[in-house]
Image: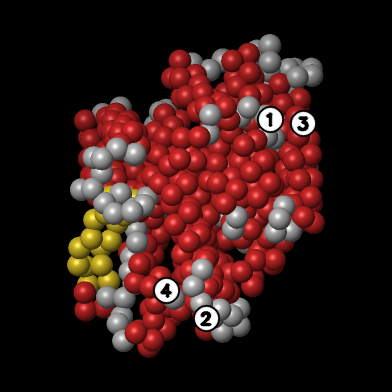
Amino acid sequence: MSLLLFVALPVAAAVLAWLSERRGPDWPRRVALTAGALLLGHALYLWALTGTDRFIGQGDWFLELQADWFPRFGIGFHLAMDGLALLMVLLTALLGLMAVVSAWHVRERPGFFFFNLLLTLAGVFGVFLALDLFLFFFLWEAMLVPMYFLIAVWGYERRRYAALKFFLFTQASGLLMLVSIIALALVVQRETGVLTFDYFRLLEAAIGSRGTLFSAAGWIMLGFFVAFTVKLPIVPFHPWLPDAHTQAPTAASVLLAGILLKTGAYGLIRFVVPLFPAASMEFAPVAMSLGVVGILYGALLAIGQRDLKRLVAYTSVSHMGFVMLAIFAWTELALQGAVVQMIAHGLSTGALFMLVGALQERLHTRDLNAMGGLWSQVPRLAALGLFFAVASLGLPGLGNFVGEFLILLGSWPVSAGLTVTAALGLIAAAVYALLMVQRAFHGEPGSLPSPPDLGRREMTALSTLAISLIGVGLYPSPLFETAGPALTWLRDIVDLQMALARGGWP
């Protein structure tokens, strides 16, 4: 029942937070903070148990919950956790708690705000744990609706436009995913005589080992690919992201950048390549090229922004391009780098959005041209801004450097040309990160009034993220040890299916 807790607790807390508003405006945030702390504590407890004999499970899957849901249609309630899922759950729990902290001063309908925030977390947890594809789709859609309300109700000046754009892009991609899931289940039923949406049974059917890019399996793979890359997002499916980030409240931006984007990358690693290895490997050069385009395009657009929040949003497009490159390189080092990059990006970009939110709350503007000279006025905020900016550009000793280095190292044997081109994104990252710091914190002070510096609550939250980034950068071994067996298992599945496609065994 440890797995069910990750979904049930935030749902129960969401309802309690909404109802507790009757007792006073402070109660919803207290409920949300308590739930966030419990979820993080539970995730850390499970991580501490990895490698011990206290887990009951087989192989690389050390926790599992399976029950019938709609057995007539082959749909089950199947949750499971391996090392990859555990790390994503840990990231979700940590950034969920940070989102609650960053929304501490929400005064407009706080009960409904934390209701939607906690429901979003429940959906994300479920996405990382679901191994029935219909259940996965259900939870995928469930996390979108509360995020829509967070943007549309508590966002900024163009919040309704941004929320609608976010919803249309993600809903359209979700429907494409549903069609692909149903098509996959029907193809497997035609081959095996069994209607199922279970991940392991679909892998055993090995439909994807025989499908080229333009076969039925190939078209289904492309449906999954588009659905996940819209959420990642990758050029040209990215236009919703800058508007959603710019108009979303700070807590929603933390969730969007920190964990919702990772659901797209997780889907590519968990489902697309293992279920459709032949078509994926045939499509890999195109996917890797799209990743490199995203790296350069996102970085160049970030350089040209004057809206600080929009600048940070475009950096996510660039960073997720590295993840796309790594996934379709599908080497051991590249996949390890992708996992580290997902975690480090969540920590650094989530922190940057918290800092931007703190600046906007104090200055009532996101315009970099109106800022300047803030280092002497808010030294703690400026110092942390510099730290997370250099983390974003990949400074050695911090988590982002480890992820990007491994991605480039692991992608080199697959495509040296694309790897070299992707490395140019590191130069562009240095430009936008240092421009952001120089224009916001250095130079002559603008005409804006002198703002207060970060308080104890904000310093505690941001220092936690900073320490986490340093830990990942200096000692990433626990991440490798946790995700390594899961990544090896996925690579073995792909190798086996490709060997079967060639008519032999590896």
Q: Which residue is mark 4?
A: 181
Residue 413 shows which numbered tag?
none
Is label 2 or label 3 in front?
A: 2
Q: Nearer the viewer, residue 40 or 147?
A: 40
Write down the quadrant of residue 306 in the picture.
top right
The residue drawn where x is 48% and y is 38% is 479
Is label 2 or label 1 in front?
A: 2
Q: Are marks 4 and 3 in contact (CB under 8 Å)?
A: no
Indicate the colouring scheme. Answer: secondary structure
First in residue order: circle 2 vs circle 3 = 3
First in residue order: circle 3 vs circle 1 = 1
What distance separates the C-alpha of mark 4 from that of mark 1? 41 Å
Q: Which residue is mark 1?
A: 395
Amino acid of disc 3: Leu
First in residue order: circle 2 vs circle 4 = 4
Q: Which residue is mark 2?
A: 503
Q: Nearer the viewer, residue 350 or 202?
A: 202
The residue drawn where x is 49% and y is 41% is 480
Amino acid of disc 2: Gly
First in residue order: circle 2 vs circle 1 = 1
Q: Which residue is mark 3?
A: 435
Q: Position of residue 93 (x, y in %)?
A: 38, 38
Q: Nearer the viewer, residue 314 or 23?
A: 314
